[in-house]
Amino acid sequence: MTSKLFLALAFAAIVTPVFAADYQTNLGPMPLDDETKLVIGGRGEATASSDGKTMTVKGSFRGLLSNATEAHIFISPVCGVPGKAIFNLDVTKGTSGTISGNFKLTGAQAAALRTGKLYIQINSEKAPEVYPWGPKGNLWGWLFPAHATVGANVPQQDHWFIPQVDTPCTKTFEDAKNA
Amino acid sequence: MRNKTILLLGAAAALGIAAFGPMAFSPLAFAQGASGPFTQAQATAGQQAFEANCAPCHLQDLSGTNDAPALAGTPFMGAWGKRTTAQLYSKISTTMPLGQGGSLSQDQYTAIVAYILNRNGARAGNTAFTPASAVQIDSIANGRAPAGGAPVAQNSGRQESAPAAGPNNSQGNAPAQSNFARAMAGQRVADPGAFGLPAKFGLSLEGNIQNYVPVTEAMMNHPPDGDWLMFRRNYQGWSYSPLNQINTGNVGSLQLKWMWSMPENGTMEITPIVHNGIMFVWGTGNTVQALNASTGELLWENRLGPAPRRPGPGPSTEETRSLGLWGNNVYVNTPYGYLYALDARTGKEVWKTHITDELKIPGGNGTLFGGSTGGVIIIKGRVLVGMTNCGRDGDDNHCYISAYDAATGKRDWKFITTALTGQPGGDSWGKLPDNKRKGAETWIAGTYDPDLNTTYWGTAQAKPWRRDLRGSGDGATNYANSTLALDPETGKMKWWYQHAPGESLDLDEVFERVLINHGDEKYLLTIGKPGILWKLDRVTGKFMAATPTVFNNVYENFDAKTGKVVYRKDIREQKVDQWLSSCPGPEGGHDWQATSYHQPSDTIIIPLSQSCVFMLGNGSQTYFEMPGTGGNMGRLSAYRTADLKPLWSFQQRAPFLTGVVSTAGNVAFVGDFDRTFRAVDISNGRTLWKTRLGTTVQGYPVSFSVDGKQYVAVTTGLGGGSPQAKPGTMLTEVHRPPNGYAVFVFGLPDDK
């Protein structure tokens, strides 16, 4: 059943018209342990719209433990796995503010957006320069196709959004190496 | 009291350093490795401080256990070799002891770092180590134990291992009396039901329960409506109560009837067991109590011991999850591998045995082989118990499930849960010799189908955890992460089904096996840390269906026709010094917080967690929110079991740290990390009632009745592994008292 669903969703992702697609993410702290949680924190939200050739990103953040320094769009091979930066976003150099950007997409980048492989990352002054597990940063979030969300403790009936069910985001995206 | 404890601990550690001086291992008694940036005095003091504060989890030989990574040998050097001593100090001083980062003095932390470096081959020098001393660790240490020191682990961190050795307390070959115990020696409490450190172990209050009704096989097969006789209430593991006095219409008026404070420190994830108006409950330090279930009056108490090995919440290795009843006895398995039968009427010991006959680990300095944390299941007069912490690389020991005569304690059979050479599935370990086939622990008690006379158990992952260290290549490593179907009278295996062949990221499939029927079809449902809800034919073990319940990026493919999973390429090819993303992480998906099967609506209700990790080869981890969850770590989801159709789900910031109990009143109860205990409507997931308790609501809630009144009981407690560690780090806005272990009992107002 699940494989069929995967295939159906993958097929849908390919054949669905690529214009007017909307995406959303919630920006949460990058990996935490008892050391990094002292310098990493905050939350944000962002959306992206795309006609298949360009992408417009807008978002906001708050509660950083030090000023934001830069923000990027990254491409990852599998959602939840770090990748490499492909675009720079405009970002407010404060502990709260906005991010924004408008970009031309290659075919591979557009495909990555459709399949949940792009993520937003905001860096900050106090976030460690080097993580042993990958790139530095403060907040991150994967852009997924727009889906219903509800507040905490509000039940959703029937199907609810599960990333790998509703997108092929865990199918390895080899083009991430060349995008 | 908390501050006093910490002060006492610190004072004890300092006194220990002064009084005992260098112990058996001299930090300078070797001549290999480069000179380190620390002194002999620091390394010596560090040994004392380490044993007082770190060894309860990382073990005395630094080999690590469960969530505590190895701090010596290849795993340590793989994780820390390219990092600096200052980074190691920062990590330890801000995060350790677990949940109490910064609670030791700077001198103690620097000494502990010196000791760890020393145990990894770095030599002492003339310069004292300071927090600013920044030397790349592999330039001074090589991971090899100094001559004359205790063996340094060369295996994976988080491997199975046994409690630290040392002086004894009242319990035969029980684990070491910790420095915590020594420090607390002056704070004795003799009164039954009162806790500091018990003045003595044993029967502190003898009971005299009249007219006790012996528990029979008929009762076990068909539990009386008002009783909760075993772990998940019935043999089928439903956690469903047929009581309906408390229902969707009146649950909003639920009120506290009584509460009972439990022993503090250590780890508590227990199920209150209720029979005929008597509640039996286990507390830390293996304290077993009988309470009047309607009033909370203490009826008897037996302090089996030993005391928790350090102050504050304990690790996941120091608990048990359920007691068992049979005849006139209550049965208790302890984390250190003992199995007791106590007289349910008096609390007196009837018999006692050890699941490995107190077998000592080779080279383990008296440490016993085997532990048990999953509770028991009693079938036809046999007490079946699983095993944890079983065997180290190269010894001949393995994990097994074993059965004991409930009347005498004599072992009837045991079934080794790793497939050895020549056995079915024995070729799935590559060319590994049998003495390197470890893991497949059984840390959750099994379930049972009386009609099929079959008991079903889940197993945990193979050990070492990571396939690159295990040496089993792409091998499936049977019977790890499997469902086992055994004959309860002989231990003979009928079939097994492996859910996650070759697992490599601490994603156990060990949890409850729920047995359900649809007409004549007999199914088994289970869900493990990867968050896949599985449905098997429990007659044959054939895969029937499965569905993902949370985000999962460790499988790049999942074949719904066969149930076959394919790990991501970088996981299949993982290397020891490689950080890997794992969604879910070791918190699950699903963890020990068990499901409930609401039979009237064919609904299974599942506590889920939504966190991910980056994990390094030695078990080091750092945590992040699961993509797509908006930072909500907790999720409670309901599925129809006939077709695994999703029915409803809600998420919240705090993960759920209790199992679920559902009732014929169409309500389900569940508690969470942030102290909330709630009732939800089974038909739609809406919260109907909630209250806030003293600390984390942790354990397995139950429902029972006494004299025609229905109650709901739940425990609060702390300690444990990933389900505590991940939210404890990530939910920085949540503040919980480090004490408050208790059982709470709720009921309707008396006039209703």
Image: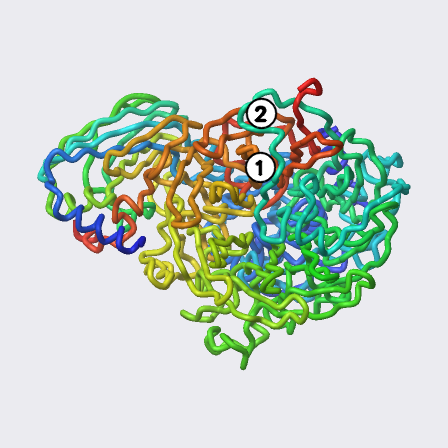
Where's the C terminus of chain B, which quadrant? top right
B717 or B594: nearer the eye? B594
Q: Visible in this render: residue B202? A: yes
Q: Residues within 10 Å of mark 2 (few under 14, many from 20)?
A: many
Looking at the picture, which amino acid does disc 1 mark? Thr
Earlier-in-chain disc, 2 versus 1: 2
Q: Are marks 2 and 1 in contact (CB under 8 Å)?
A: no
Left or right for B669, reference B504: right
Q: Residues within 10 Å of mark 1 (few under 14, many from 20)?
A: many
Residue A11 coordinates in the image, percent (x, y)? 17, 51
Identified at 55% across, 29% down, the residue is B679
Tell how many labels. 2
Q: Residue furthest front?
A: B519
Looking at the rendered structure, which numbered label has been put on residue B603?
A: none
Left or right for B102, reference A101: right
Question: Which quadrant of the view contains residue B489?
Answer: bottom right
Looking at the rendered structure, which numbered label has been put on residue B663?
A: 1
Label 2, label 1: how far apart the Cα atoms are: 12 Å
Q: Chain of mark 2?
A: B
A155 or B579: nearer the eye? A155
Q: Chain of mark 1?
A: B
Which residue lies under the disc numbered 2? Answer: B251
Identified at 15% across, 31% down, the residue is A56
